[in-house]
Image (cartoon, rainbow, N blue to C red):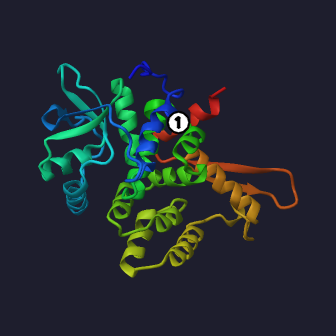
Amino acid sequence: MSEKKKTRGLGRGLSALMADVTEERAAGDSAPRRADMTVPIEKVFPNPDQPRRTFTADQLDELTASIKEKGVIQPLIVRNRPGHEGEYEIVAGERRWRASQRAGLHALPIILREYSDTEVLEVAIIENIQRADLNPVEEAAGYRQLMDKFGHTQEKLSEALGKSRSHIANLMRLLNLPEPVQEMLKNGELSAGHARALITTDDPLAIAKKVVKGGLSVRQTEALAKKGGAATQKQPATRPKVEKDADTRALEGDLSANLGLRVSIDHKPGGESGQIVIRYDSLDQLDELCRILSAS
């Protein structure tokens, strides 16, 4: 308790904030974290700004049964509840709190931290991203929140979350798909592999409907997307008829992933010149692109 830190800077505190969530997930039943104290369950309250609102009944049932048998192995991370002396607000562990109520527990082990409102939201998003049951769109939205709200870069997220930068970048590209396609992804009608094949197409929704209706595989979807994209080209002179080489396609993929936008490279074979085309779907995306290009 004597080593509690004051409000951390946004980028500077990411690793420190990650420590609570990562240690909590890494510790097993044989090595539970030591609680700072045990408090009455009625003194613990959920975070009203918790970004995750859905708690699966089956998983709650499993956790409730485990808590009835073994108790709460890992303490909840909490802070003092603003404006309510002697009460605590959950920072990480709301699922355990809900299951403990169902199990009829009267007290909970807690670890008390000094977090600002901003840090509470940041930790909540990090905890949600670390969950295994998020769909790709939810995970991508979590990365976007951490970048937009707290100024984190893909590199920092990659280091702190233990995810590859390409994994983060590729998932975030899914947010460029039309909302109906994202819904198909959330509902499990499309996999992340299907969705990635649609990102660079001119009409991803039309192709997505064909994929769902025909029950197409990812490979079939990639072939359909390539065929659909080629069919929409009206001026063959603007794009080489020959296949782009692997290096060019890899560079297109890297740029698209890093920018979160569709990028096409047209390089004149045997020459030194060419062009890069960056497509945006909204003025917000254009503003973000201008910000990236003008950043010093």
Vertical placement of 16 versus 58: above or below?
A: above
- At x 51% / y 62%, what residue is drawn? 196
**Furthest-front residue in this view:** 30
- At x 57% / y 31%, what residue is drawn? 291
**258 or 270, nearer to the observer:** 258
Q: Position of residue 113 (x, y in %)?
A: 35, 27
Q: Position of residue 42 (x, y in %)?
A: 12, 35
Vertical placement of 193 versus 27: above or below?
A: below
Q: How many marks?
A: 1
Vertical placement of 107 versus 222: above or below?
A: above
Q: Position of residue 179 (x, y in %)?
A: 36, 55
**199 or 167, nearer to the observer:** 167
**51 or 266, nearer to the observer:** 51
- At x 49% / y 31%, what residue is drawn? 16
Give the labeled residue for mark 1: 288
Q: Is residue 157 left or right of residue 48?
A: right
Q: Quadrant of the N terminus?
A: top left
Q: Quadrant of the C terminus?
A: top right
- At x 35% / y 64%, what residue is drawn? 184
Q: Position of residue 211 (x, y in %)?
A: 42, 75
For the residue labelled by badge 1, is the local secondary structure a helix, a strand or a loop?
helix
Q: Amino acid at mark 1?
A: Glu
**Furthest-bottom residue in this view:** 214
Bin the neighbour count of mark 1 within 10 Å (Cα to Cα): few under 14, some 14-19, many 20 and up.
some
Q: Is residue 32 left or right of residue 39?
A: right
**144 or 53, nearer to the observer:** 53
Vertical placement of 36 versus 204: above or below?
A: above
Q: Is residue 250 left or right of residue 124?
A: right
